[in-house]
Image (cartoon, grey):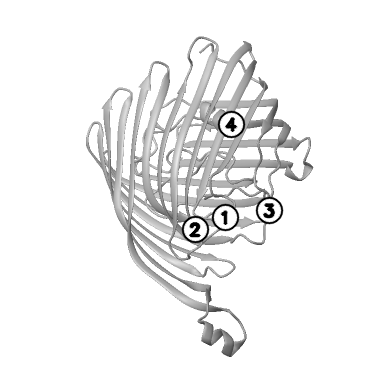
Amino acid sequence: MKRELSCLIAAACLAQNPPAPSLLSRGLLPDLGTRPPEKLFRADIGALTGYDTGALTTEFDRGAGPFQEVEGGVAARRRTSRADIRLDYRFGLRHHTRIERLDRSNHALSLDARFRLSRRWAIQLRDTAASSSFGASFPEPADALGPGFFIDGGPEVFHSRTVANTALGDLVFSPSARTSVSIGGDGFVVRRQYHGLSDVSGWRARADLARRYARNKTLTFSYSFTHFDYSLAFGGADYAVYAVGHSLRLGKRSELDLLAGAGHLRSAGVRRVELDPEIARLFGTSRGAEIFRVRTWTPHVLASWTQGVGSGQVRAQFSRWVSDGGGLSGLTRQNQGTLTLAAPPADGWRLAAGLSARTFRSLDTLLFDSTTATAGFTLARRLNRRAEAVLRYHYAFYNFNRGLLHLFHRHQAAAGVVIHFQDLPNR
């Protein structure tokens, strides 16, 4: 969130950044010393035109019509025997011909730095920032879901800008080649432009122990504690997670990752309630406020399977966890299943497709229960060494228990050309 696809760019990013194969081996030291130094620089820009059946704006109307879009990005990497630094920036600019208030600009920036201090010690630092409309416009990496709280865009379908930043740091100690201990902390903040949506900020402390007890098997034990605060009337909460993980490589190109645990949630806040008619006549108002408290245990589960197929990859994943409510509530319990495919159907072609279904249930308010489903694909044809034609389609379905988002459908289709500033592979 962990997170749903919210625009056509997501399918293209999936093709350029396929899911990471090893989810639960994150506690082991980065393997820097055994690889030769490496430099990488990629850049691309594209122009597309398409049609959107209409997002729901903060004026509670739909704005269907054609649009034009410019997208692009830069990725850079520098790896030496003791450091691995990666920078990735993506952007998208969209103009709606008929309804200019739906115009938008989306940006996502990620900086990842890993330093090996000695044979036993390493530091890992990461910062991710995003500014977007209509929820998360760029998908998170496949290993973004850790053992604790997950910052997620939630069911954001309004045309309202969201600015988010997360900073992470880990210190890894490896007493042996098969064992490592990691301690780290996160800080996060999410600001939403629309005054009706809630902001969130907080921090997380975490630790895990990883033991590779066989050549292709890794066992992990993890703990995390998260504190976060919400604006408006949602108060704050503490969330502690105890989890056990197991990663198993089934074959040369197949891996199964499992994570299971329990989270202890303590939340408090203020919410508005309807008063009893007799009390309402006495005070002259029909609504009041009450302090509520939530204290419960909730499952924290993740299962993913990755399989290489030819020169492509298939990934299936199921998760159940507690996350941000996307501005509509404080916390939500979510169940999500995803299936992604990234593969070249033939020389000079590139295909990326994805399916996702998710359920939300508010934990600390009575605002909503909902079901969200998305599907989309990107098909690209190589035109020459540095250009390709792109066709995209994306579908989203929202079913809230009440209101304008009950049985809400949205379709987007676009086509255009993407220019790369480096030679493309044949496959």
What residue lies at 60% left-to-right and 41% top-to-bottom? Answer: 109
Task: Name the front one of labels 4 and 3.
Answer: 3
Q: Which residue is mark 3?
A: 58
Task: Find residue 325 and report its horizontal and vertical position in percent.
Answer: 50, 56
What residue lies at 67% left-to-right and 48% top-to-bottom? Answer: 159
Crowd rating for badge 3 (residues with CA inside 10 Å; few <14, some 14–19, many 20+): some
Label 4 with label 2: CB-CB less than 8 Å: no
Q: In the picture, residue 242 is in which quadrant?
A: bottom left
Q: Is residue 383 left or right of residue 37?
A: right
Which of marks 3 and 4 precedes in the sequence? Answer: 3
Which of marks 1 and 4 precedes in the sequence? Answer: 4
Which of marks 2 and 1 precedes in the sequence? Answer: 2
Q: Which residue is mark 4?
A: 76
Q: Is any atom of residue 358 visible in this view? A: yes
Label 3, secondary structure: give it.
Answer: loop
Q: Which residue is mark 2?
A: 368
Does residue 147 sit above or below 94 in this rendering? below
Give the distance between the C-alpha atoms of the residues marked 4 and 2, in whole angstroms: 41 Å
Task: Identify the amino acid type marked 1.
Answer: Gly
Give the distance between the C-alpha atoms of the residues marked 1 and 2, in whole angstroms: 10 Å
Label 1 with label 2: CB-CB less than 8 Å: yes
Task: Identify the amino acid type marked 4.
Answer: Ala
Label 2, secondary structure: give it.
Answer: loop
Give the distance between the C-alpha atoms of the residues marked 1 and 3, in whole angstroms: 14 Å
Label 4, secondary structure: give it.
Answer: strand
| Towards the viewer: 407 or 188 | 407
Q: Which residue is mark 1?
A: 403
Q: Is residue 227 left or right of residue 419?
A: left
Give the distance between the C-alpha atoms of the residues marked 4 and 1, in whole angstroms: 45 Å
Give the distance between the C-alpha atoms of the residues marked 4 and 3, in whole angstroms: 37 Å
Task: Find residue 410 and report its horizontal and vertical position in percent.
Answer: 59, 38
What residue lies at 47% left-to-right and 31% top-to-bottom? Answer: 354
